[in-house]
Image (cartoon, grey):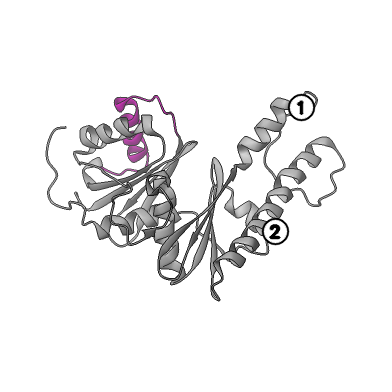
């Protein structure tokens, strides 16, 4: 069967997440490293190889929607969709009808991924919610029960915080992000892992508590996403659920809202 799928691309500063939706479910998803200076052909060939490895024909892509927070990567992904999948990608921006009213002083400053997350989270919560996204930065986004994006918090991400600690402290090693069994570390690596994991647990609980106080709504669901959401959420008291593919689901919902072209594919680029 051909020409029946939506390709969703979430191009982040560290990783790009791809998902393929057939109208009923996500039939496949991938996570690859983002390279801002990658060319159109490099991006296209990478995506085609991912499809080939799963036995999926590129002709199955009928439409594409993209959330991109890496400006240099916009052109390559746009052209890759045209050249290798024969579709014109829809990029989420400040003017995209999302169903979310952005109350930020300058809506253009809000990353597309944060709006996309807000769309999916508000639908899941069916009301007020807070999204905690563990990406290159750890972001907190607040959405009211009336689907108003109020704003949020941006903190350094877990990975870059740990890397900065390694680079700025001469005697500290580079360590993996792993949850130690207890807070009191008995050697340097364990102590660093404790500091980063339980430190972010405290950061999440503390910030969410303050956000909920300011929001002032009775029923608020806190939803976590991002690569390390599962790790940190195990010890937090404020995260209600983890949705690893929240951004892809938000992209799918926006694609439905804006009625992305689902007609026959055109040949050529």
Percent position (x, y) of residue 221?
54, 68
**Residue 55 in magenta stretch:** yes
Q: Tell me the residue at 50%/36% (across/down).
A: 14
Percent position (x, y) of residue 202?
71, 54
Q: Earlier in the sequence, mark 2 or mark 1?
A: 1
Residue extending farthest to the bottom is 218
Percent position (x, y) of residue 12?
45, 40
Is 222 on the left or on the right of 96, as rendered?
Answer: right
* Crowd class of label 1 (few under 14; some 14 to 19; many from 20; radius 10 Å): few
Q: Which mark is residue 260?
A: none
Can you tell which quarter of the image residue 80 is in?
Answer: top left
Above or below for 114 versus 119: above
**Of residues 11 and 114, the one drawn nearer to the viewer in this rendering:** 114
Q: Tell me the residue at 81%/52% (across/down).
A: 182
Assign a secondary structure to mark 1.
loop
Which span is picked out in magenta? Answer: 34-57
Percent position (x, y) of residue 96?
28, 52
Q: Tell me the residue at 60%/45% (across/down).
A: 155
Residue extending farthest to the right is 186
Is 45 on the left or on the right of 138, as rendered?
Answer: left
* Crowd class of label 2 (few under 14; some 14 to 19; many from 20; radius 10 Å): some
Is 184 on the left or on the right of 126, as rendered?
Answer: right
Assign a secondary structure to mark 2.
loop
Q: Which mark is residue 235?
A: 2
Residue that label 1 marks: 169
């Amino acid at each position: 069967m051909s020409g029946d799928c939506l390709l969703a691309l979430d191009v982040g500063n560290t990783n790009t997440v791809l998902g393929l939706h057939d109208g009923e479910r996500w039939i496949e998803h991938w996570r690859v490293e983002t390279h801002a200076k990658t060319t159109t052909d490099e991006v296209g060939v990478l995506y085609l190889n991912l499809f080939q490895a799963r036995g999926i024909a590129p002709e199955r892509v009928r439409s594409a929607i993209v959330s991109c927070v890496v400006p240099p990567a916009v052109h390559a992904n746009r052209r890759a969709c045209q050249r290798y999948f024969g579709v014109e990608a829809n990029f989420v921006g400040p003017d995209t009808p999302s169903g979310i009213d952005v109350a930020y002083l300058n809506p253009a400053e809000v990353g597309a991924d944060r709006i996309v997350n807000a769309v999916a989270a508000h639908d899941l919560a069916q009301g007020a919610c807070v999204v905690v996204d563990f990406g290159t930065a750890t972001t907190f986004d607040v959405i009211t029960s009336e689907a108003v994006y109020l704003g949020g918090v941006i903190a350094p991400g877990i990975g870059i915080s740990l890397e900065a600690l390694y680079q700025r402290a001469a005697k500290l090693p580079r360590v993996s992000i792993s949850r130690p069994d207890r807070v009191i570390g008995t050697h340097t690596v364990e102590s660093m892992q404790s500091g980063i994991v339980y430190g972010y647990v405290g950061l999440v609980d503390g910030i969410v508590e303050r956000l909920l106080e300011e929001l002032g709504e009775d029923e608020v669901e806190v939803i976590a996403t991002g690569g390390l959401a599962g790790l940190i959420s195990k010890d937090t008291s404020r995260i209600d659920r983890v949705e690893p593919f929240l951004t892809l689901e938000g992209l799918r919902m926006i694609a439905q809202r804006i009625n992305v072209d689902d007609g026959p594919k055109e040949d050529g680029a």
